[in-house]
Structure formats: C-alpha cells, structure tokens
Image (cartoon, rainbow, N blue to C red):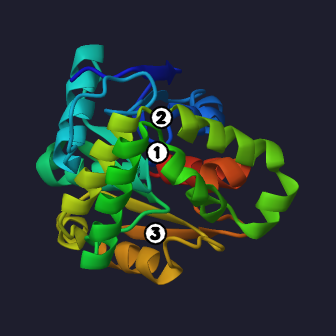
Amino acid sequence: MRLAIEQQGSGPAVVLLHGFPLDRTMWANQLGALSDRHRVVAPDLRGHGQSPSPPGPYPMEDLAADVVETLDALGVEPPYVVGGLSMGGYVALALADRFPDRLLGLMLLNTRAGADSPEVARNREATAQAIEREGSTSPLSGMVDKLFAPAHRRSRPDLVDQVAEVIRRTPPEGAAGALRGMAMRPDRLGVIRSLRVPVLVIAGAEDAIVPEAESRAMADAAADGELIVIPGAGHLSPMEAPGETAAAVQSFLARLP
C-alpha cells in the first residue's frame, strides 16, 4: 500500500514512523533539523493521517511492508536508517525482522520490544470496539495526558491541544485496526539481538508508558546499542524536547558509515 508522505532534504535516507494514533506531523521539528544532510521521509502509516484506512486489523508486519513499498516507489535505495516512536517503533522492529538487509541503522524512541500482556491486549480490543460503536476516536481522548510529562501538560497547552486534534481527526477504522494489530505483535527483543547494525534507543525520563528499564533492556540487547534518556520528556520526546532529540539523532547518524 502506498502511503502519504512528507520528505525533505537529500542524501542518505532517514525514515521516521509516528506513534498511535498520530500522524507524520509529529516529526515536523526533526524534518527540519535533519534534512540539511539527509533525505528525511515521514509517512502516515496505514489508517492514520492522509493514508488509506482499509478494514483492519493492521498487523505490524503489514505496516512495515507498506513502508517498504512506499520507499521503493519513491526510489529510496536501501540501506537506510529507520526510526519509530511507540507504535512506529513496533513497525520499525517488524521491518527489521522482515527486511534486515535494508537497514543501515535502527532508532527506537519511547517504545518497547515486548508483546502485549493479555490484559493490555484485552484493553486494546475493548477500546477498538468502543471506537467502532461511537464512530469516532473520542474513546482515546483520555490518553492525551499520559503522553506528556506533567510539566509539559501545564506549560505547553498548545502542544497538548495539537496532539488532541490529531487524535480527533484520526479515522476511527484506522485507530481500531491499529489497536488490534498492536495486540497481535510478538516479542521482538530477539530481533534486536540479531541485528548487526547500530541501534539507538531514546527514552523520556518522565515517560509514563514505557519504563526506562525496558528502554535499557533494548539497548543492552543490541550488539551496538546506545541509550539516551531525554530529561523532562514524557512519551513524545521529539515533540516535548525537539532540540535534545534531534541532537541525539544527529550524533547517532554521524557515526554511521
């Protein structure tokens, strides 16, 4: 499936995959910061933003295949760096699992390698059903506060409102399909262990969704892994701390071949 994308710059390609239930606009700061030396491609994943929203579920493997198909259609030659935040990290890991030879490096931001627990999977299904009953993403409105560090919830109401608006306009069928797809995903810590490319893990020091210990476990599992913890950031490090996140990514990219 061809995806809607935004791209800037030229040079070695960096692919940025957004979280749930957001879209490519979350990478606006990184597009600008990285495009002086790289071709930065940020797609809307299936069911989000301006990309198609077919009936679900959306296994992470299918979302990864969408990304590869879109990059091929754009003429983006592998190997390239792939980075993903939260659900985008699940997609990046699925891509690394299925297409390891396409990777020059892997970046995992505010995400985890583990599978859902049975309780989390049940909660995802219940939320998907609520979205379908209501015909909107209003059942997701309560998640907005969990995405931000407390200080940013107070000091950046504009940013909180921006994210809430993106969630409101996410297609309901896309949100339900992604929820069910995330619940199906396997544990991929072994994929990280098998990779022979550098892996950057970025965590928010105040991320209420992904504990720092899980981020450290991913970095430790990689043959060439690095963990950077962003002070004061919650689950949306690239939006809450764009300068610090871009600096971490730029440092990682600078040491790749």
Residue 29 at x, y percent in the picture: 66, 36
Q: Amino acid at mark 2?
A: Thr
On screen, residue 95 above or below 149: above
Mark 1 or 3, which is nearer the eye? 1
Which residue: 37% across, 80% down?
217
Q: Amino acid at mark 3?
A: Glu
Determine crowd level at label 1: few under 14, some 14-19, many 20+ residues with C-alpha closer than 10 A. many
Work out how far the residue at label 1 is from the one at label 2, CA to CA, in angstroms: 7 Å
Secondary element at tag 1: loop
Q: Which mark is residue 21?
A: 1
Residue closest to the eye, 199 or 17: 17
Q: Which residue is mark 3?
A: 226
Which residue: 56% across, 59% down?
143
Q: Is residue 124 left or right of residue 56?
A: right
Determine crowd level at label 2: few under 14, some 14-19, many 20+ residues with C-alpha closer than 10 A. many
Q: Is residue 27 in view?
A: no
Residue closest to the eye, 65 or 147: 147
Which one is earlier in the sequence, the residue at label 1 or at label 3?
Answer: 1
Q: Which residue is mark 2?
A: 170
Is the C-beta separation of discs 1 and 2 under 8 Å?
A: yes
Is the C-beta separation of discs 1 and 3 under 8 Å?
A: no
Is the C-beta separation of discs 3 and 2 under 8 Å?
A: no
Residue 239 at x, y percent in the picture: 66, 47
Residue 82, quarter of the rendered image = top left
Q: Is residue 224 left or right of residue 18?
A: left
Residue closest to the eye, 95 or 49: 49
Work out how far the residue at label 1 is from the one at label 3, CA to CA, in angstroms: 27 Å
